[in-house]
Image (cartoon, helix red, strand yellow):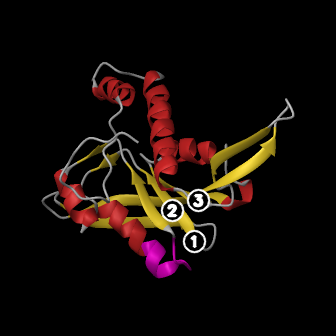
Amino acid sequence: MSELKHHYGNQFHLIDDPFSQSLLTQLCLPETKQPHIHRMVEKLYTNLIMSACTQLFPRLTTVNKTRMNAELSSEILDPSTKAITVNLARAGTYPSHVCYDFLHWFLKPDHIRQDHIFAARKTNEANKVTGTDLGSFKIGGEITDSYVIFPDPMGATGGTINSAIEYYQNEIQGPVKQYIALHLIVTPEYLKKVLS
């Protein structure tokens, strides 16, 4: 995976992809409207989940007979990998669906699930964000040895991701293999909070 250089450490990957950057630039323009917004988000999240899986998921080597009766040795993504994509409603709903659908290309269907968390920002009297209110949940079971993926377009303050991860750590049987957050845009404040 081609990455841009940065100073945020090895837990953060900034993908160097001119095609995705072109789409993201168009997506950010005020004149971009539906249905193009959804089409761009679908392509951007397909690229993000593909890059994340290629970089982070386990692989194995298989040997198969082809239609031409030849032997094909291939390094593939391990189909027994367990993955959970989390819909952080509202902005994460469509990206989570895109990622959930994509995972079915190579993982066993019963090793994939989509969880749902309804989150909102808590604010004080001055409208300053003070935390995250996790409203309701639909969690499909344990997370042991799973990759838990949060496709959330905007990493703003880090409060929602941190609260969601803490909920999984404290309330759901684990441990996980890895938490993966997939964002289109992040702020330095977000990175500082989440990476610490």
Q: Residue furthest left?
A: 126
Question: Which quarter of the figure is the C terminus placed in?
Answer: bottom left
Amino acid type indicated by mark 3: Ala
**Numbered mark located on residue 148 in the image:** 2
Q: CA gap, disc 1 to disc 3?
A: 9 Å
Residue 104 seen: no
Measuring from the top left, give residue 82's x and y in whole percent. 62, 62
Q: CA gap, disc 1 to disc 2?
A: 8 Å
Q: Which residue is mark 1?
A: 143
Q: Which residue is mark 3?
A: 83
Crowding at mark 2 (Cα within 10 Å: few <14, some 14-19, many 20+): many
Q: Are marks 2 and 3 in contact (CB under 8 Å)?
A: yes
Total numbered labels placed on residues in the image: 3
Q: Which residues are magenta?
A: 167-176
Q: Are marks 1 and 2 in contact (CB under 8 Å)?
A: yes
Measuring from the top left, give residue 2's x and y in whole percent. 36, 39
